[in-house]
Image: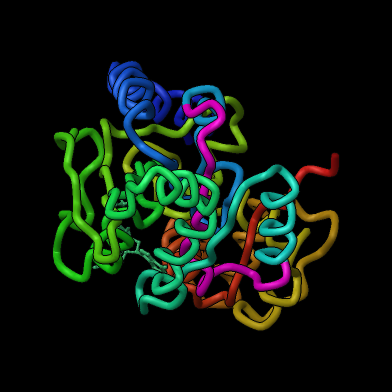
Amino acid sequence: MKDKTENLQAAKINWFPGHMTKARRMIAENVKIVDTVCEIIDARIPLSSRNPDLDELTGSKPRLVIMNKVDMADPERTRKWAEWFKAQGKFVLETDCKSGKGTAAFTSAVRSMLREKLEQYAAKGQTGRQLRVMVVGIPNVGKSTFINKIAKRRAAEISDRPGVTRGKQWINIDKGLELLDTPGILWPKFDSQEVGEHLAYTGAIRDQVVDIEALAASLLALLRDFYPDRIETRYKFAPPADASGYELLSLAGKKRGFLISGGEIDTERMANILLDEFRAGKLGRITLELPPED
Ligand code: G4P
């Protein structure tokens, strides 16, 4: 079996090409012409699905953090994260773009964020002025789905493949709002192996570039620490506190009856099933990261 670190390193090489420099440059250029920046993140991995350079790139522009996929995230942890972002001076909107829940509040959230600016415009008699919002997000956070919901039409191509850079696109939203979609593709930052793993668990990194068994084993160990009851409910065994991730994977495979000739457990099959079930939400609503305690 290939070493997991080696595989995530491979992912790093495939996933962090010259696009990042281009995206950075485009964000820095376009930030000057927008009123605010809207950052979409995956509520299941609020840290790993962010790009840490964004603060530096967008400077003092007011920031709206859209915590998307809240339907799949742990509600209690989503609440903690929302509080944390607010304490950092950000505005927060929780959305489930699949059903559209939360997206209707977008326009009013932007307006209340920019209230002072709107008042200044009104004082100068510039009442009809458009508000411009730049939307950024790493691949797979649901940016296209979000834009489609907000624009109420198929404005953005869903499931754009990583690496395909789209051009600058202004999208008119009702009530005097304009969105600037994707000035280049913002890539995540693999500054730790954990970030790479968390992106891979949620499917943001393609499975072809990671070691499935190692990935599933580390996910099981994480679930055992955070949500042991979910393992018990879904895979019908109480995960031992001292078992390794790989042992947990074997136990799950055994319970499911995934055997290969000679009585060996088919851990590869179990790994694929576990990742599919996790991504499909069959283990319940899960958030894999907690806000930093600072
Ligand atoms: P991107 O532009 O940021 O790369 O992401 P995109 O909108 O393509 O969404 C990536 C996947 O996430 C899509 O699933 C999409 O349906 C799903 N998604 C987006 N927002 C939400 C959400 O709030 N909740 C849930 N549960 N899923 C969301 P897919 O499997 O690639 O496509 P499909 O099966 O929906 O067709």
Q: Classify the position of the C terminus by image quarter.
A: top right
Percent coordinates x, y for residue 97 in the rendering: 38, 69
Query: Which residue does the image show at 56% across and 42% down from the upper left?
Result: 48
Relative placement, left or right, of 75 versus 6 is right
List x then y, in percent, for residue 248: 67, 60
Residue in view at x 71 percent, y 43 percent: 88
Q: Residue at x 41, y 51 (%)?
A: 122
Front-most of residues 164 and 84: 84
Question: In the image, is residue 289 part of the stretch drawn in magenta?
Answer: no
Q: Residue at x 74, y 61 (%)?
A: 80
Left or right: residue 188 versus residue 250 is left
Q: Quadrant of residue 183?
A: top left
Q: Quadrant of ligand 1?
A: bottom left
Please identify the quarter of the rendering in which residue 170 is found.
top left
Q: Which residues are magenta?
A: 58-76
> Which image quadrant is residue 187 in?
top left
> What count of labels does the image hold?
0
Is residue 74 rendered magenta in the image? yes
Q: Is residue 280 above or below residue 68?
A: below
Is residue 261 in view from this perspective?
A: no
